[in-house]
Image (tube, helix red, strand yellow):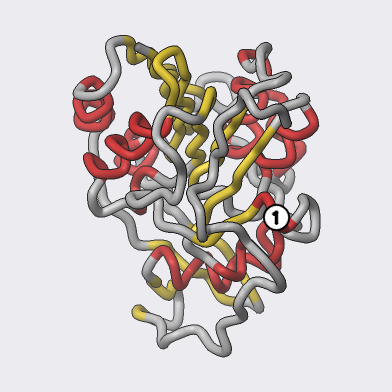
Amino acid sequence: MTNSIPPVLEPGHASEGPLPIRSSVPPLLGSPAVLKVEALKGHELWADCYDSQPNPLLHREEREILSCLKDVEGKIVVDVACGTGRWTRQSLRLGASQVIGLDASPAMLRQAARRVPANTLVQADATALPVGSLSADIVLCSFAIAYLEDLNRAVFEWRRVLKPCGTLWCSDFHPDALEFGWKRTFKKNGLTYELLSHRRSAAEIRACLRQYFRTVDSQDLYLEEAETHLVSPGHAPWALPGVPHPPAVLLFCCRD
């Protein structure tokens, strides 16, 4: 990278050596049928099987964003709540000059480190980014909004690190899907876990984003035929004619 590109990471936050390993996951809340777990603890549990479990929501979101991300080459990208590094990998593949993946979960970062250079990954909270102001061209935050207690603080941080002409892409499980009865769940070792989250309407999220960005475009993404192969036969009601189903993903693109 040339000297004209400002460093993304602030001093003292580079990842060196192996990421820390948590020895245990704290006790879970809930009944034997569905165990309710706080988001961070849940992602610690989910990490080692996250990429092996087909997820139609991630597939739908990725199809949409990839169709729009035409200008990543040579850009600096910050992937907030990067998880196992899905968008970190995509950004590198698309030719970004520098990518930094940030996540609060050590277990998720360990999985990400198997697929992207470890020096691109940093353990950090989405509301306190160890990233220089006005340094990123693109900020991505995928399926994490509802896990953030202080969304206003998080959006402030995302705007702070973006350059004046930068773009924020953020997505989440659609609030309408939650109202329809869909759950934030995953399965592991025969158990079903439900991730606890903060319920916000699409209007509430949009209002928060508009405090920091002049242009806030949103899309309601529905699961389509392209997602049917990711679920068991008969478990894709969105592909059946006449069967009502809600939008699955809420996607925002924000710019000044």
Q: Residue 66's spot in the image, x, y percent?
A: 67, 21
In the image, is 229 to the left or to the right of 70?
right
Residue at 28 percent across and 36 percent down: it is: 156
Q: Is residue 246 visible?
A: no
> Exactly how many numbered labels are in the figure?
1
Task: Say which of 154 and 67 sits in front.
Answer: 154
Residue occupying the far front of the picture: 3
Q: Residue 52's spot in the image, x, y percent?
A: 75, 57
Task: Say which of 28 and 183 sits in front.
Answer: 28
Residue at 40 percent across and 72 percent down: it is: 37
Q: Residue 49's spot in the image, x, y percent?
A: 70, 65
Task: Say which of 200 and 110 sits in front.
Answer: 110
- Look at the picture and state if 59 lies above or below 38: above
Which image quarter: residue 149? Answer: bottom left
- Look at the picture and state if 198 lies above or below 23: above
Mark 1: which amino acid? Asn
> Split into 4 quadrants, where in the image is the N terminus?
top right
Which image quarter: residue 106? Answer: bottom right
Residue at 31 percent across and 36 percent down: it is: 155
Residue position marked by numbered label 1 in the rendering? 119
Which image quarter: residue 152? Answer: top left
- Look at the picture and state if 107 lies above or below 139: below
Task: Say which of 151 and 77 sits in front.
Answer: 77
- Mark 1 is surrounded, within 10 Å at the Cα level, by few (under 14), some (14 to 19) or many (20 or more) other residues, namely some
Q: Is residue 201 visible?
A: yes
Secondary structure beneath label 1:
helix
- Look at the picture and state if 38 lies above or below 127: below
Residue at 66 percent across and 59 percent down: it is: 50
> Split into 4 quadrants, where in the image is the C terminus?
top left
Q: Residue 210's spot in the image, x, y percent?
A: 23, 20
